[in-house]
Image (cartoon, rainbow, N blue to C red):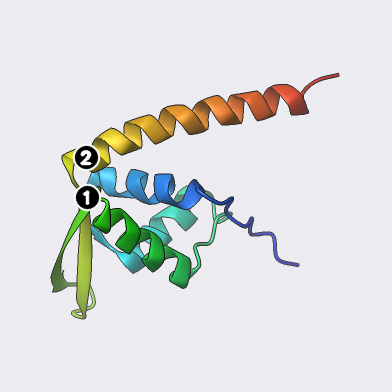
Amino acid sequence: MNTDLDLLRGTLDVLVLKSLIFGARHGYDVAAWIFETSRETLRVDEGALYTSLHRMENRGWLESEWGMSDNNRRAKFYQLTAKGRAQLKRSTADWTRYAEAVFLVLRAA
């Protein structure tokens, strides 16, 4: 039985932004961080991840440069821009408010 939760539409961007708050990462590292941090609950589809990274780069939230990964493979590393940090702050506030509202409904007697 697959216990991984599918990411709700719009959730991936905020998770990716959060993963990059700690410094530059390549795509595989972003996905691994999300999976590990969610206690192996949220698995990010590779196609969705790279679509998200490219979209956010086009919006000016991320910048990227090529480098070498830990296993000596060429990889594109992404990092937050000032605009991306501001977006993370807004998105975090929005998702927190949304999650709190959902929990209010779910906990209603």
Q: Residue furthest front?
A: 59
Element marked by disc 2: helix
Q: Are marks 2 and 1 in contact (CB under 8 Å)?
A: yes
Q: Compared with residue 89, is residue 53 higher up or lower down, i.e. above or below?
A: below
* Separation (CA) of disc 2 from disc 1: 7 Å
Label 2 sits on residue? 83
Q: Residue at x 50, y 48 (%)?
A: 10
Name the residue nearer the viewer: 64 or 33: 64
Q: Is residue 21 visible?
A: yes
In which quadrant of the rendered view does residue 85 lie?
top left
| Residue 92 in picture, x, y percent from top left | 42, 32
Mark 2 or mark 1: whose residue is earlier in sequence? 1
Amino acid at circle 1: Gly
Q: Residue at x 43, y 27 (%)?
A: 93
- Looking at the rendered image, the quarter that the C terminus falls into is top right
Within-10-Å neighbours for mark 1: few <14, some 14–19, many 20+: some
Could you say which disc has been placed on residue 60 in the image?
1
Amino acid at circle 2: Lys
